[in-house]
Amino acid sequence: MAVEGLRERLKNGKDIIVAEGYLMELERRGYLQAGAFIPEVVLEHPEVVKGLHEEFVHAGSDVVVAYTYYGHRAKMKIIGREDDLMELNVRALRMAKEVAVKTGTLMAGDICNTTVFRRDDPKSIEEVRDMFREQIEWAVQCGADYIIAERYDEFAEAMLALECIKEYGNGLPAVVTLTPQEKDETKDRLTYPEACKKLEDAGAAVVGLNCLRGPVTMLPLLREIRKVCKGPIAALPVPFRTTPEEPTMELLIDPDTGSPAFPVDLPRFFCSRSQVADFARQAREIGVQYIGLCCGNASHYTRLVAEEYNRRPPASKYAPDMSKHYKFGKKTFLEKHHAGVHDM
């Protein structure tokens, strides 16, 4: 049975749950190095990546995102593995496609910020175009259902990514997300609503924001984007307690040490489950149709997002039910199954 595509789902008013956050989750598990943040794990421990794909689908993700983030030519040069570039991308894409076919979900190819883009340098632009082209072409060859272009702090690089998807993507839809910095504007001085509207007008199927900002500091921008964009918008914040004073995870300061929490001490700033659920609830009220979490995400968070969007994924079978707890459960339950405990 054919899987309904991204455009069709969105056109029919359906929401898309998307689990991202592979980078930090795999770093926490000891399979990826903080700093370079390059997905060597795809080559060295593919079974771990595949397991995480399956775990996120179990938790409610409608999409298996091929783990090619930072798997581009510029990053691979840093670790001396440029010769492994094609193998890494193709293996990641095929693995994601295998899980998507098995689970009846969509598979997304992924291109991202390159760290070498210079909008006033034609040579840099062509270098980045070539990097986008090869990753997009591999995604098409491996059966991607759409292409994600993510984490751009400059509108110009995001627009170049969109242009490349349209040129090399064989008609696949593009989901393009900008990454909100400390100021409420891109590095090339566009407000996020302005930038998202331009990307939408240029043909992106979905536009929005991902990464850096947590729910509290991303939601106000989403409300403004919703006012100007007519089509589906995306929201994938990090699940960290950012504030107006420290609006991105890179700005969070550990109060015990006075040092930046990013990246190794971010766990002290994790959102509670209730905070993630509240974010998803507010996003749904705003009209966010493409929803998920980015760096810091884990499967229990994805399940909460899915449930707030009226889903019941397989993982919901194991959602907390404290009525059965030996101490905090209902009195009638305790009297029946744990005689004497309620008198402790």
Image (spheres, rainbow, N blue to C red):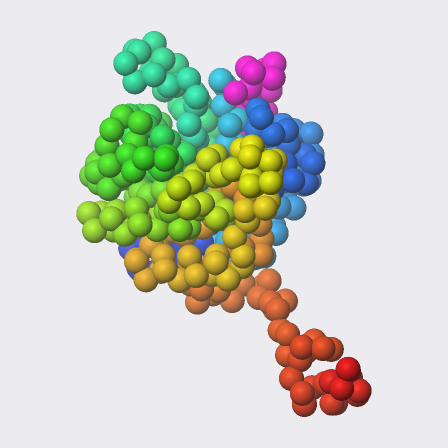
Q: Which image quarter: residue 125? A: top left
In the image, is residue 297 part of the stretch drawn in magenta?
no
Q: Is residue 205 above or below residue 190?
A: below
Q: Is residue 102 above or below residue 112?
A: below
Residue 24 shows up from this direction: no
Q: Is residue 91 left or right of residue 223?
A: right
Most foreground residue, 298 or 262: 262
| 262, 312: nearer the viewer | 262
Identified at 48% across, 48% down, the residue is: 241
Quarter occupied by the C terminus? bottom right
Residue extent of the magenta highlight: 75-89
| Outermost residue toward the top in this view | 123
* Residue in the picture at 63% in, 43% down: 50
Percent position (x, y) of residue 309? Answer: 42, 63
Percent of width and height locating residue 272: 54, 57
The count of marks equals 0
Q: Quadrant of residue 265?
A: top right
Please state the horizontal and vertical placement of residue 170, each as a whole percent of the image.
35, 33
Residue 70 in the image: x percent, y percent? 51, 27
Relative vertical location of residue 343 with respect to residue 81 in this rendering, above or below: below
Q: Is residue 81 magenta?
A: yes
Question: What secondary structure prevails in the magenta region?
Answer: helix
Considering depth in this image, is 311 or 263 the residue closer to the camera? 263
The quadrant where residue 177 appears: top left
Give whichever of 335, 243 is nearer the camera: 243
Can you see residue 214? yes
Q: Residue at x 60, y 40 (%)?
A: 256
The residue at the point 41 percent across, 34 percent down is 151
Residue at the right extreme of this rendering: 340
